[in-house]
Amino acid sequence: MCGPAMFPAGPRWPRVRVLQVLWALLTVLLASRRLWAIKDFEECTWQVVLNEFKRVGENGASDRFFEQELVDTVGNLFHMLVDSPIDPREKYLGFPYYLKINYSCEEKHSEDLVRMGHLTGLKPVVLVTFQSPVNFYRWKIEQLQIQMEAAPFRSKEPCIAEEVCSMSWYTPMPIKNGSVVMRVDVSSNGLGTFIPDKRFQVNINGFLKRNQDNDIQFTVGDELFNLMPQYFVGISSRPLWHTVDQSPVLILGGIPNEKYVLMTDTSFKDFSLVELSIDSCWVGSFYCPQSGFTATIYDTVATESTLFIRQNQLVYYFTGTYTTLYERNRGSGSWVRVLASECIKKLCPVYFHSNGSEYIMALTTGKHEGFVHFGTIRDGQVSFEMLPREWSVCEQIGVTTCSIIWSDYIAGEYTLLLLVESEYENASKRFQVVSYNTANDDLELLYHIPEFIPEARGLEFLMILGTESYTNTVMTPKGISCNPYNHLIFIWGNFLLQSSNKENFIYLADFPKELSIKYMTRSFRGAVAIVTETEEIWYLLEGTYRVYRLFPSKGWKVHISLQLMQQSSLYASNETMLTLFYEGSKLYQLVYLMNNQKGQLVKRLMPVEQLLMYQQHTSHYDLDRKGGYLMLSFTNFCPFSVMRLRNLPGPQRYTRQERYRARPPHVLERSGFHNENSLAIYQGLIYYLLWLHSVYDKPYADPVHDPTWRWWEKNKQDQDYYFFLASNWRSAGGVFIEMDSYEKIYNLKSAYELPERIFLDKGTEYSFAIFLSAQSRSFRTMADLGTVFELHSHVDVGVVLADPGCIEASVKQEVLINRNAVLFSGNLMVPVFIGCPPGKRLAFDITYTLEYSRLKNKHYFDCVQVDPEMPCFLFRDIFYPFFLIQDLVTGDSGSFQGSYVLLVVGGGPTLDTLKDYNKDEIYRFNSPLDKTHSLIWTTRTKRTTKDSAFHIMSHESPGIEWLCLENAPCYDNVPQGIFAPEFFFKVLVSNRGVDTSTYCNYQLTFLLHIHGLPLSPKRALFILMVSLSVFVGLVIFYIAFCLLWPLVVKGCTMIRWKINDIIASESYYTYASISGMSSMQSLRRSRMGSMFSSRMTEDKAEPKEAVERQLMT
């Protein structure tokens, strides 16, 4: 890299009048170029606001992002889509907000511009990036993006025009569980007006609520709408402390004598002044002396879910309501005071989370001097621990009195770096750097800071060895800071010390000892900004030794002149900086401007590169004589004019960024405008797409490795039919859902810049090329034969490695004369995230397992009741399991070639009776060393773990043979019907500790359905005996029945006739005494008819002769 750090030594030119002329010429030159650019290319910018679901189409509507519950009114619309590829029986929900998108250009009406853009085919493309959560134990770590195309929508305001007066573009604003920080990038589809890309922070504000009047208010206090100048003018700036890339809401205090703070959920694009609802009490005692009381909020720290403040010696925290992170009841109802019995003098932030938690440190004075209160925040729950756990820092470093003036936490090493001030018996004070390990409670004295500032003697930097001479200026340290990415440590005060190993420090002599650093802000990407007690701003590149003053400076004067010429609203003659902070790699100021007695709080970019360039041009120039004239020329200190990156690989394999694409459904309206129903359907489709992504972690691998495959699996063949309906304006609901519009993108192209982060697995390389376009006079011709050109100025390219023992880097230089460029290409193992890349998973390859089992076993028998999601395997067949490594980012899916351990960790005869086994049971059921006859399975492979406890298998293993010995849970299983017993095994597969081909510790748990289990010999014999007994009994009963049945029938018949005779005799003698002889015959006929009828009814087979004989008797 070329810049002011490479100034050559040379004579100082006289610069009295010439310097003033130079500034004027430079201002006119740059301003004219700027005005020419504005004339040819209009400066247009995107504008994005949030609209609630029910307020879409309202002009001027802008809402705050705090609702997190999904909208359940979308599903009714999908029931109308009968001729669409979606399944209306599925659950479709909507999100509570839309993104409303417009754009504006200078001196032009926004509504006219939007209409013109729509008519020329302009469509905004919105890319929403979800930040990974802190607690990876609860939520999956992933880098997820969704790309949406905005839909045009007419305003609901009255319009006399035939088609449209006012319009905007809308997209759903999706919400994802575990993510409260979202980044929205808006770009153009390439048609219509040229509008540069723009990024917005759209975060969930968990510190808002609705009151009884349905108005939105803060839960932490009362919002103030009048930003009085006395709150900001002339006050001292203060640092903006928060967890990097994880804090949705930022908070900034420091307003004198008021309980006021600035709060923002858009990184100060918008903000609110809030009066906090705290008691403002003051507690003084003999161990916590206070010289006075003030309501000022001194320290403020923001984390993912919780805000911390310090007022005097009191510390409070407030947990926001984030249902996407944890349960609703985790949110605070009021400010919670912690460390009530302590006297807290300072809060120290921890910029990076680790181990699923965030951290904060409180420095105490008084009775617990020499201790640090270490706070841990996880899922909104806050806990503090006093460290060291036994002896204080003072006691362990051997001094009677000491004070911890700053603390920094290196999360990856579990190490506290403490800046300690020690007092000795002779009243002298010395400063030390102390390291404390929170894991093993080990404390170590790392470095003694020199008492006086070294004498640099004209050098830019000086290695502190103890043999150098010193000035009379006392070193006054104020803070310590460490970058975990490159292990670079700074100790700052009225000096600046730098170290990369915590032992050897370098004094940076460019920073004047007459100044004192108030705070530092780091991008953690190589840049450091410094703010002094006098509000000067200095700049430093990590790893270099030059420190540059940005403000006030000559370059700043040039920059201000240019801005005032353009009448920029971001600058004023009277301004006060409130804070200086990095957002990504860009440096921003939060400034209060006073113009004509009116105040304005703005966020503006600090143009570091331009300021350094202006300062370079104003400081180094030449006066060359051309004939009789002196011409002004600038010294070109860099032999290369442009640096470009080329041959960059596809970014997704290294950044692990997953991206989906979703376009709005086509509306069957000739103007192309959407309505509320079509936008609501768009919401439901986005929700379902993200839902498919969230549930795509099934242990059984799908035949097609894509989360959207199951969505369109059954309707893909009817794609032409749906298109035919839409082409003839016959689609139900007035919308046409195109299946190809909802997909996952696997082939993103590089943007010709290095990615923000890179993940490398074991043996992975990341390579790229750097092209440096050279100036024409940077080459010279050599007279030697065979030498064409050589560089007149040389540039060395180096790679700084934070951990040389873990990574390697190689650089190769090539000179390409025919392209007027120099090519530096090499392989770089990036020292950012080395380990298992997110987005890779282990899956059971059921498709190939079935094919291979059928091939090896010569057959395959599924269960009687077939389940396509979980095919069965026969007990007596050898089981050959195969697994896949699926890359959810790139879409790659290949056979797992590494080693693994397979364990049965649970099981049951039915899904409802599944049981997880304990450690002892897992050992007995899976270990080849088991002597209790409890093995469930075995294999012929001989490779085992180091303790020989379990088999180590691979894709080349000979397979698994099911045993189910007598003490195994699957032994002697009772059948549930007439079919053989079945059993469900819960199988765990892991490569941890047995696979050296990757850094990934894969673990997969899945259910395996086995049928055809054999019965135990006893149960089989018992069932056989019972079955034989039942069978023999049935046979005997049948034979006896056949032999005895005729006799039984005959006996029954005789008994029946005897009963009938008795009844007939009694009836005859009763009626004979009453009736005469004349009635006797009729009685006999009646009796004969009755008996004959009864006889014919009961036994129709009786002969007629038997009846007559009966009557004659």
Image (tube, helix red, strand yellow):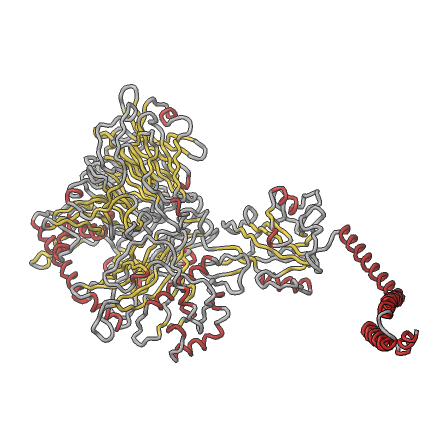
- The image shows residue 661 at horizontal and vertical percentages of 39, 64
Tell whether 296 sits left or right of 1061.
left
Front in this rendered view, residue 508 or 930: 930
Asked whether residue 1 is in view, the answer is no
Which is nearer the eye, 1033 or 1110? Answer: 1110
Q: Residue at 43% of width from left, 31% of height from top?
A: 442
Instruction: Relative to 36, say whether 425 is above or below.
Output: above
Q: Quadrant of the C terminus?
A: bottom right
In the image, farthest residue toward the bottom? 728
Rendering quarter of residue 788 = bottom left
Q: Along the horizontal axis of the image, is 598 left or right of 845?
A: left
Question: Relative to 217, is 666 on the left or the right?
Answer: right
Q: Can residue 319 be seen from the camera position used here?
A: yes
Q: Quadrant of residue 356?
A: top left
Total marks in image: 0
Residue at (19%, 45%) from the top-left corner?
A: 577
Picture coordinates of residue 657, whole percent (x, y): 40, 57
Residue 319, placed above or below residue 863: above
Q: Could you say where residue 815 lies in the image, as x and y percent from the top left?
A: 33, 59
Q: Quadrant of the rendered structure where residue 221 is?
A: top left
Apparent side of residue 956 relative to residue 559 in the rendered image (left or right): right
Picture coordinates of residue 18, whole percent (x, y)? 9, 51
